[in-house]
Amino acid sequence: MSPAGGSHGIVGMRLVRALNRFLGDQDLGECTLAETGFILDRNPDTVRAPDIAFIAAERLAEALTPKFIPIPPDLAVEVNSPSDTAGDVADKTRWWLAHGTRAVWVVDPKSQTVATHAPDGRAHVYGRDDTLPGGEVLPGFELPLAELFAGD
């Protein structure tokens, strides 16, 4: 996959900063870098890497490996790139949820929206004037999306 553009990287980093501020000294878990691979299918092995992932504290021991992480993240975040098609994004979202991810957020810098997806099929789209909640995975997390999309 080719490198992403500026909006993708800047918006993604803003979200990582917000998540890390929220996590602070709490022992809730950790975020991973985009290069972190999760292997959830075997024979043949399938490795995927979301743009941002969160793994809850009670599952971190399984994730602390020099190899690909063998468990799904609790939260997978995909930041859309201009080359992403709606079908590609829907496929990624379904894949994460089907493999045990508890929530998927799809961040779209172009439309300045974040769509949240749950395994039971619930989905919600938040716009620039809304506040993104952490839901069941990150209770108490709130991010005004005007901060995420500032200057875009």
Image (spheres, grey):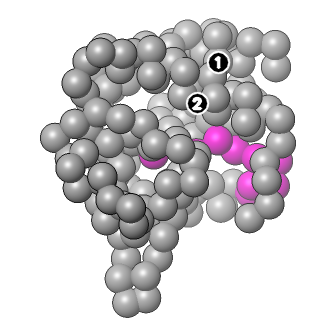
Q: Which mark is residue 148?
A: 1
Q: Amino acid at mark 2?
A: Val
Between disc 2 and disc 1, the foreground one is 1
Residue 129 at x, y = what percent? Answer: 63, 9
Report how far apart the C-alphas of labels 2 and 1 lie in the structure: 10 Å
**What amino acid does circle 1 point to?**
Leu
Determine whether, in the image, residue 26 is placed left or right of residue 24. Answer: left
| Of residues 44 and 131, the one drawn nearer to the viewer in this rendering | 44
* SS of the residue under disc 1: helix
Task: Answer with the quarter of the image where residue 16 lies.
Answer: top right
Residue drawn at (48%, 70%) of the image? 47
State whether residue 17 is above or below residue 76: above
Where is residue 112, by image quadrant? Answer: top right
Q: First in sequence: mark 2 or mark 1?
A: 2
Residue 35 vs 12, above or below: the answer is below
* Left or right placement of residue 38 versus residue 2 in this view: left
Measured from the top left, where is residue 127 in percent x and y? 63, 20
Residue where numbered disc 2 is placed: 114
Residue 43 visible in image:
yes
Q: Say if residue 119 shows up in the picture.
A: no
Q: Are marks 2 and 1 in contact (CB under 8 Å)?
A: yes
**Which residue appears farthest toward the left when viewing the image?**
58
User: What is the magenta range?
Assistant: 76-85
Q: Residues within 10 Å of mark 1 (few under 14, many from 20)?
A: many
Image position of 10 (left or right of 16): right
Dominant SS in magenta: loop
Q: Quadrant of the N terminus?
A: bottom right
